[in-house]
């Protein structure tokens, strides 16, 4: 595997910084010099090398990333993002069951890097976590996947549904039946509202719990031994939220809509 | 901001090669020695460093990537493959216009690493479609994006339509208009076949020409001036074909069916 080019960029913080700077757009040599507070003698050879490698192109005295350079840099960033994500809590990521994350999202898991891990104690494990409770009232859109039935779930999203927000909720077959039996009133409100789409998917596969709102993301992974962890991932970051929504859409595609009979 | 996991992977070719080899599955010490063509004494240190970083696990004589190691290698692959792709034919890739390739696929262009760049010879340079179809076996289906004006296309494709091959044909808008002006009847009679479906991209993008057979594919990316320079990319491996199919599906998704039957 040829990877000398990556080494070449990665090993020099100077080159990497230059590339990041050019990510904003074309710059001329004076802008580059003053941005890095450096003289031509030091920076020009670097630029020349990067031009030779096809990463930077020069046109009319302006330097910019080539298409290839841009793509390489973005892929390098995804790789860095993944490392940063893991380094938040290596044990957590080592032990999470990620087998139900589709390839295209698994590859991009670094997009979750701007998130926090909320650790539950015995006394609050049944509560709706604060950040979720605070964001529910202002969210406009909800994508939910529930592999179990937290006591707060049946009523959590009734307000938004009543207020015309869009809720899309996927439950496993046994959780759907449990909700219908134990919370018939709430179940009916979900089923009958034009604002709520209910989906059901078969039991047997442990997929992570997802609450992806347009302003907040909550993810709960099972561990590799099939036990639900005591940590949940929370984020207000746009990229993380989009990742969560996309995951939920993947699960929606393999679920069936629940219809009134 | 420098991540220690990344340094562990990037700052030593040995460690990286070891991880790339283990990404194929669990390996014994003997297998590692053979694959990396190195003495175990020279591998002891990198193995220890990877174990300390939590990127690989050892059980007796077997070594495997940890989940975090797998995650890191998976997110490194798009970059490594892209560098491979681009560095083997860098003058070709540096001069390609890739603007019509959607971002999520552009980032995965490394999947084309086993494709080869071919310069069409004088006698076939104006008939890339014909040239490709004469040199490949098509049994089931053809997926084509036509971006180059090709007077011969309707006649050639009719032969395949006769043989009950399913043909999905996406036209770039201007190419379609031009061809319809000169060869309207031929196009219509081609589209009359049950197994032929026409689509048109209405957006002003300049998509590459794509011909996807059952087991082979050619893509003609235009150069930076948007011109055809008689070079094409030829592929027959699964990763390339999957990528090509995804690109085709993307164009199909943004195009409209043409002419009611």
Image (cartoon, coloured by chain):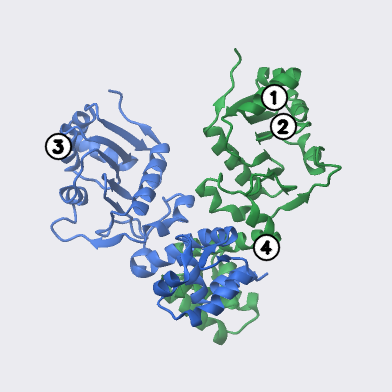
Chain colours: A green, B blue
Residue B172 found in image quarter: top left
On what subunit does the disc labeled 3 rest? B
Q: Are marks 1 and 4 in contact (CB under 8 Å)?
A: no
Camera-near label (4 vs 2) is 2
- Per the image, label 1 sits on a secondary structure element best described as helix
Asked if badge 4 and badge 2 are on a common chain, one would say yes
- Per the image, label 2 sits on a secondary structure element best described as loop
For disc 3, the neighbor class at 10 Å (few under 14, some 14 to 19, many from 20) is few
Q: Are marks 3 and 2 in contact (CB under 8 Å)?
A: no
Residue A87's disc number? 4
Residue A230 makes an appearance in the image: yes
Q: Earlier in the sequence, mark 4 or mark 2?
A: 4
Residue B57 found in image quarter: bottom right
On what subunit does the disc labeled 2 rest? A
The residues tagged by marks 4 and 2 sit, at their Cα atoms, a distance apart of 31 Å
The residues tagged by marks 2 and 1 sit, at their Cα atoms, a distance apart of 8 Å
Residue A149's disc number? 2
Q: Is residue B253 above or below residue B61?
A: above
Camera-near label (3 vs 1) is 1
- Per the image, label 3 sits on a secondary structure element best described as helix
The residues tagged by marks 3 and 4 sit, at their Cα atoms, a distance apart of 59 Å
Residue A178's disc number? 1
- Lateral position of residue B151 relative to residue A58, left or right: left
Q: Is residue B70 above or below residue B132?
A: below
Q: Are marks 2 and 1 in contact (CB under 8 Å)?
A: yes
Q: Earlier in the sequence, mark 1 or mark 4?
A: 4
- Lateral position of residue A254 relative to residue A150, left or right: left
């Amino acid at each position: 595997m040829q990877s000398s080019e990556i080494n070449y960029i990665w090993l020099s913080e100077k080159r990497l910084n230059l590339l990041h700077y050019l990510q904003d757009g074309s710059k001329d040599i004076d802008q580059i010099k003053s941005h890095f507070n450096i003289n031509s003698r030091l920076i020009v050879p670097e630029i020349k090398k990067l031009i030779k490698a096809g990463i930077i192109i020069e046109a009319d005295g302006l330097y910019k990333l080539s298409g290839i350079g841009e793509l390489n840099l973005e892929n390098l960033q995804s790789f860095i993002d993944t490392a940063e994500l893991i380094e938040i809590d290596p044990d957590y990521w080592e032990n999470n069951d990620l087998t139900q994350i589709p390839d295209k999202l698994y590859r991009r898991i670094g997009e979750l890097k701007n998130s926090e891990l909320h650790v539950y104690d015995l006394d609050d494990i049944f509560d709706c976590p604060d950040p979720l409770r605070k964001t529910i009232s202002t969210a406009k859109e909800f994508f939910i996947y529930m592999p179990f039935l937290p006591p707060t779930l049946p009523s959590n999203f009734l307000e938004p549904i009543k207020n015309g927000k869009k809720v899309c909720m996927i439950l496993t077959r046994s959780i759907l039946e449990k909700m219908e039996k134990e919370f018939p009133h709430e179940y009916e409100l979900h089923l009958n509202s034009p604002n709520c789409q209910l989906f059901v998917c078969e039991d047997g596969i442990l997929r992570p719990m997802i609450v992806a709102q347009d302003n907040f993301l909550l993810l709960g992974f099972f561990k590799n031994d099939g036990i639900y962890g005591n940590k949940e991932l929370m984020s207000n970051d746009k990229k993380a939220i989009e990742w969560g929504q996309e995951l939920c859409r993947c699960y929606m595609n393999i679920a069936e809509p629940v219809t009134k009979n | 901001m420098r991540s220690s996991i990344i340094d562990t992977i990037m700052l030593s070719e040995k460690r990286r090669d070891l991880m790339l080899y283990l990404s194929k599955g669990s390996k014994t010490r003997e297998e590692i020695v053979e694959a990396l063509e190195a003495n175990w004494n020279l591998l002891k240190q990198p193995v220890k460093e990877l174990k300390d970083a939590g990127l690989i696990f050892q059980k007796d004589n077997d070594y495997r990537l940890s989940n975090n190691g797998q995650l890191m290698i998976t997110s490194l692959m798009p970059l490594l493959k892209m560098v491979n792709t681009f560095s083997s034919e860098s003058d070709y890739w540096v001069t390609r216009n890739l603007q019509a390739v959607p971002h999520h696929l552009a980032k995965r262009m490394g999947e084309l690493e086993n494709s080869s760049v071919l310069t069409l010879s004088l006698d076939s340079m104006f008939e890339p479609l014909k040239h490709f179809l004469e040199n490949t076996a098509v049994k089931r289906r053809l997926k084509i994006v036509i971006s180059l004006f090709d007077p011969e296309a309707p006649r050639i494709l009719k032969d395949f339509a006769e043989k009950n091959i399913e043909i999905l044909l996406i036209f770039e808008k201007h190419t379609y208009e031009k061809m319809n002006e000169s060869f309207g009847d031929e196009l219509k009679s081609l589209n009359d076949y049950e197994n032929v479906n026409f689509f048109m991209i209405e957006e002003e993008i300049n998509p590459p020409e794509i011909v996807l057979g059952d087991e082979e594919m050619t893509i003609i990316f235009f150069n930076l001036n948007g011109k055809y320079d008689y070079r094409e990319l030829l592929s027959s491996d699964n990763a390339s074909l999957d990528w090509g199919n995804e690109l085709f599906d993307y164009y199909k998704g943004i195009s409209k069916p043409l002419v009611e039957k």
